[in-house]
Image (tube, grey):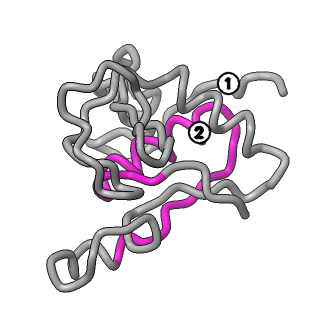
Amino acid sequence: MIKVYSARDPAEAHLVAAVLKEHGIAAIVLGEALWSARGELPLTPDSAPSVWVADDGDAERARHLIATECGPPNPARCQNCGYDLRGLPEPRCPKCGQPFTRLKPGPPWTCPRCGEQCEGQFAQCWKCGRERETPAEPR
């Protein structure tokens, strides 16, 4: 397993993992349980929620998908080193080089089981729980 993304919070980590799963990459979120201890624990790349891919061979493709499926940077501080990122034009921390992005939702989709209209950032129907049926991209 290889870590491919450090998230600002558990919701962002799950959105990134859903984007990867939508493209046929097995991904899991780790560090989510430590989120409730923030304030007591320092928020570092080791304690922040993160996305990992199961197959090491998918790591580069996963990083590319994250970069292309995400929008402009929007964090206040670098989660890797704590540097203040506000007002910087580059989507990368000037101190440690860590890139940061914000997810853009995809187009809405209709659940094939219940017909519910779901927002594009969700990989699962909010009403019935069915997984989104999206063909995986070729490798």
Residue 13: x and y in percent read: 40, 51
In this rendering, the label closer to the viewer, 2 or 1: 2
With respect to residue 20, does 79 lie above or below? below
Q: CA distance from mark 2 to mark 1?
A: 12 Å
User: Looking at the image, which is closer to me, 51 or 115?
Assistant: 51
Amino acid type at image mark 1: Pro
Q: Residues within 10 Å of mark 1 (few under 14, many from 20)?
A: few
Q: Residue at x 44, y 64 (%)?
A: 45
Quarter in which the C terminus is drawn: top right
Q: Residue at x 72, y 59 (%)?
A: 54
Q: For residue 10: magenta? A: yes
* Residue identifier under label 1: 135
* Residue identifier under label 2: 20
Q: Residue at x 40, y 39 (%)?
A: 93
Furthest residue toward front: 95
Q: Quadrant of residue 89?
A: top left
Quarter in which the N terminus is drawn: bottom right
Amino acid type at image mark 2: Leu
With respect to residue 100, does 95 lie above or below? below
Element type at marker 1?
Answer: loop
Residue 122: x and y in percent read: 37, 35
The residues colored magenta run: 6-33
